[in-house]
Image (tube, rainbow, N blue to C red):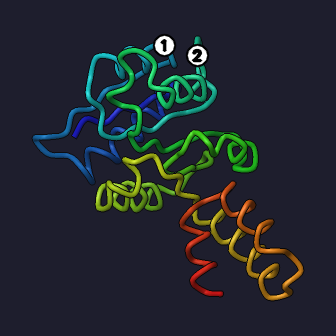
């Protein structure tokens, strides 16, 4: 597995490296480290990457700019266009959520729970078709918040199906399926 860690903070790089090596290491693990967005793009252009973690606020080029270019499939980036990306950032999930169209596999706010990151990577690796195709997967807190909000709308029947479906389309397809099946 080729795993890219795009993070400018050296201590956090070491923590993520340790986590990935401990839980997912083996002879087939190749770790790539990018200290900024420009280095991340260079690695993505020159290697087939299977999974990536990325900070948002990095020097030279932000993680969001990297992901925008990656998802756009510009030039040599098309081979990695749909890799699962886990965001690990100090930004609040509400800020990151506005970039949901970039199709993150998961989002963690610093400081993060190590076991939750391990669980997320395990989930993504065990079901790559769910993330390799670029489908957005909400974090558990986002998913629960949206489920609660949408269940209230469904119960009270105060929202028309077309409005509900457009809202669901804006968010996670997984949540949409859950709620429509429940209805």
Say which element carries label 1: helix
Quarter of the rendering occupied by the C terminus? bottom right
x, y (%) of residue 58?
59, 22
Foreground residue among 31 and 42: 42
Image coordinates of residue 134 in percent, x first then y, are: 45, 46
Viewer-proximal residue, 181 or 58? 181
Work out whether 134 lies above or below 33: below
Q: Are marks 2 and 1 in contact (CB under 8 Å)?
A: yes
Which residue is at the far left? 27
Instruction: For label 1, count other residues whose C-alpha is less than 10 Å away and answer few (under 14), some (14-19) or many (20+).
Output: some
State the image coordinates of residue 28 (x, y, percent, origin top left).
13, 40
Q: Is residue 94 above or below residue 2?
A: below
Residue 12 lies left or right of residue 95; in this view the side is left
Mark closer to the chain start, 2 or 1? 1
The residue depicted at 51 percent of the width and 19 percent of the height is: 37
> Label 2 to label 1, Cα distance in Å?
6 Å
Could you tell me which residue is drawn at 21 percent across and 33 percent down? Answer: 30
Q: Which residue is mark 2?
A: 61
Question: Badge 2: few (under 14), some or many (20 or more) residues near its Cα, within 10 Å?
Answer: some
Q: Is residue 135 left or right of residue 28?
A: right
Expressed as whole percent of the image width and height from the top left, the position of residue 128 reads 32, 54
* Residue, disc 1: 38
Residue lying farthest to the front in this orientation: 162
């Amino acid at each position: 597995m080729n795993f890219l860690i795009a993070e400018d903070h050296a201590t956090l790089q070491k923590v993520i490296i340790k986590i990935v090596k401990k839980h997912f290491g083996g002879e087939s693990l190749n770790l790539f480290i990018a200290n900024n967005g420009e280095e991340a793009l260079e690695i993505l252009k020159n290697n087939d990457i299977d999974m990536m973690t990325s900070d948002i606020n990095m020097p030279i080029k932000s993680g969001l700019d990297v992901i925008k270019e990656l998802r756009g499939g510009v030039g040599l980036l098309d081979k990695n266009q749909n890799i699962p990306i886990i965001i690990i950032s100090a930004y609040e999930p509400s800020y990151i959520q506005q970039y949901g169209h970039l199709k993150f596999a998961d989002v963690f706010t610093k400081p993060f729970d190590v076991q939750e990151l391990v669980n997320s990577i395990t989930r993504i690796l065990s079901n790559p078709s769910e993330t390799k195709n670029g489908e957005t997967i909400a974090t558990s807190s986002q998913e629960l918040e949206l489920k609660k909000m949408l269940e209230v709308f469904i119960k009270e029947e105060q929202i028309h199906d077309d409005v509900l479906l457009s809202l669901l389309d804006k968010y996670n397809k997984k949540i949409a399926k859950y709620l429509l099946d429940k209805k």
